[in-house]
Amino acid sequence: MPELPEVEALKDFLTEHLVGHEIVRVLPVAISVLKTYDPPLTAVEGREVTAVHRHGKFLDLETDGGPHLVTHLARAGWLHWKDRLPDGPPRPGKGPLALRVALETGEGFDLTEAGTQKRLAVYVVHDPQEIPGVARLGPDPLAHDFDESRLAVLLRPERRQLKGALRDQSLIAGVGNAYSDEILHAAKMSPFKLAATLTPEDTARLYEALRSTLTEAVERSRGLAAGRLKAEKKSGLRVHGRTGEACPVCGDTIREVSFSDSSLQYCPTCQTGGKPLADRRMSRLLK
């Protein structure tokens, strides 16, 4: 799933390639991706893109005097930039193509979604705050006013595990499964640690890990073409998706806890005092 760093990089890329250009056609291929109907999708056609914004994991194209075209790439969605779009309209079918946006230059981009769980979402709205997922977003962790004290206030009442708290978009916007693993590894904290039990020293360490992990990921992605961002994300991850590999910090074996629809990775030596965390799904399989 694209998270804050990848969506921030896409925002920068599209700012360079879209702003000042006119959207001439928006071609839906999978109607299921459209989550709004008024204004219609055609309301952005013939309008110039004036700015590109990021709201958590949402990508927002603002048009001159018109509505916003907002996208959430969900778990398996992606944006593919085309220096030259194919001639003719795309054919509906069972492929991954969901929506095509064409500019007056002949350039444009495709939104695609792999897999069978179709969650990619496209909205056309007058104000992004009309989208429930945007309206409920918590503060952006890379915002200038997001400081250590604000993180402490957010986590103090949270009687749940840090992993879940960091992924909650209404608490902190933009962090997902991969970067929450990376942040907790950098902070040397168990994903099962209760957020409300953090000491001031713990909060300071978590804040530094949160900001540095996301900032470094954004910097690695900055200036890359859209098609290279996925590979860059994977290459920069230390523990997420690396079950069975050696921890790059201490050399211990990276372990995994599996859930019904996701998994987390961690280093026992760095994060849990050398003790493996209970993997309830694996435990049930072994009975």
Image (tube, grey):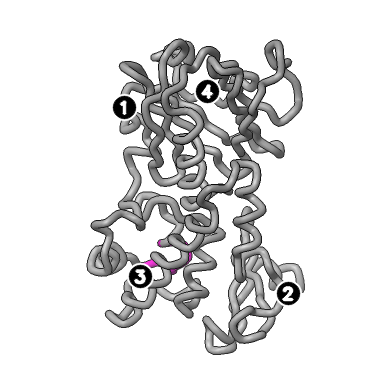
Residues at circles 1 and 2 in contact by the CB criterion of under 8 Å: no
Residues at circles 3 and 2 in contact by the CB criterion of under 8 Å: no
Q: Is residue 148 above or below residue 47?
A: below
Residue 170's spot in the image, x, y percent?
Answer: 36, 50
How many labels sit on residues? 4
Instruction: First in sequence, mark 2 or 4: give its number.
Output: 4
Residue 114's spot in the image, x, y percent?
Answer: 69, 38
Mark 1 sits on what residue?
A: 127
Q: Nearer the viewer, residue 18 or 125?
A: 18
51 part of magenta stretch: no
Mark 2 sits on what residue?
A: 244
Instruction: First in sequence, mark 4 or 1: give its number.
Output: 4
Instruction: First in sequence, mark 3 or 4: give its number.
Output: 4
Q: Which residues are magenta?
A: 159-165
Give left or right: position of 18 versus 86. Answer: left
| Residue drawn at (65%, 42%) of the image | 227
* Cα distance in 3D space between marks 3 and 1: 31 Å
Mark 3 sits on what residue?
A: 207
Q: Is residue 267 above or below residue 265?
A: below
Residues at circles 4 and 1 in contact by the CB criterion of under 8 Å: no
Q: Nearer the viewer, mark 3 or mark 4?
A: 3
Q: Nearer the viewer, residue 139 or 23?
A: 23
Residue 197 appears in the rendering: no
* Cα distance in 3D space between marks 2 and 4: 40 Å
Instruction: First in sequence, mark 1 or 2: give its number.
Output: 1
Instruction: First in sequence, mark 3 or 2: give its number.
Output: 3
Name the kind of residue labelled 3 in the image.
Tyr
Residues at circles 3 and 4 in contact by the CB criterion of under 8 Å: no
* Cα distance in 3D space between marks 1 and 2: 46 Å
Name the kind of residue labelled 2 in the image.
Gly
